[in-house]
Image (spheres, grey):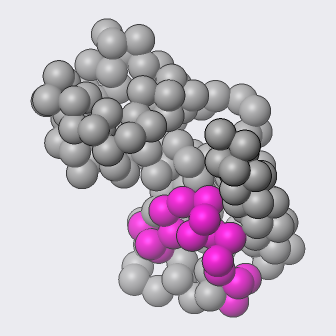
Amino acid sequence: MRQRASGDSARPVELGEFPGIPFEFTAVLKTRGIIHTAHFLKATRKKEDLIRLASATGIPVSRLEEMQALCHLIRIPGIGAPLAKVFYHAGIRSVNAMAGETVLSIRQKITRGGNAYPEVITSLQDEELSRFLQHAKQMRENDRLNEAKE
């Protein structure tokens, strides 16, 4: 069975769906009302927010930064929790980073370095990567326009 890495950017994803995020982290975040990606992104808009959250929860800043990157990547339509983790391990950690890639560069990054999710990587088609890139570029442009309005 092919593991689908799909996701809907409009649908918040529970933090526990990301592979490798300890249950203890998601449990302590839930006690603070942070249950899914939208909650997490709202609570961690600035670096200072991450530092405060780390201090309040005991979760290392580096792990919160990882979770933040995963939450941003999953905003790209078609990218689900397992695929966000693949991109994260490949060094693609934001919508902007994704938008700056090519299909070839992404393929090279995700296939080198012994990624921990080979079933996701082998099922990923270049057409899907191309769609992710198109979405990321559009999202980057939308983010720039929104920032200019503020």
Q: Is residue 21 above or below residue 76?
A: above
Residue visible at 40% across and 83% down? 113
How many numbered marks does the figure carry? 0
Q: Is residue 51 above or below residue 70?
A: above
> Where residue 88 appears, x then y in whole percent?
46, 62
Horizontal arrangement in the rendering, residue 138 relative to residue 7 (left or right): right
Question: Which span of residues is magenta-colored?
Answer: 89-104
Horizontal arrangement in the rendering, residue 51 relative to residue 18 (left or right): left
Residue visible at 68% across and 70% down? 99
Horizontal arrangement in the rendering, residue 43 relative to residue 63 (left or right): right
Residue visible at 82% across and 67% down? 134
- Residue 38 visible in the snapshot: yes
> Where residue 92 appears, x then y in whole percent?
51, 69
Q: Nearer the viewer, residue 126 or 50?
A: 50
Q: Is residue 8 above or below residue 93?
A: above
Q: Nearer the viewer, residue 18 or 143?
A: 143
Residue 149 appears in which quarter of the rendering? top right
**Residue 102 lies in magenta, yes or no?**
yes
Horizontal arrangement in the rendering, residue 15 relative to residue 144 (left or right): left
The C terminus sits in image quarter: top right
> Where residue 89 appears, x then y in whole percent?
42, 67
Q: Is residue 79 above or below residue 12?
A: below
**Residue 124 lies in magenta, yes or no?**
no
- Residue 6 visible in the snapshot: no
Residue 129 appears in which quarter of the rendering? bottom right
Residue visible at 76% across and 66% down? 137
> Where residue 11 appears, x then y in whole percent?
71, 29
Q: Nearer the viewer, residue 52 or 107?
A: 52
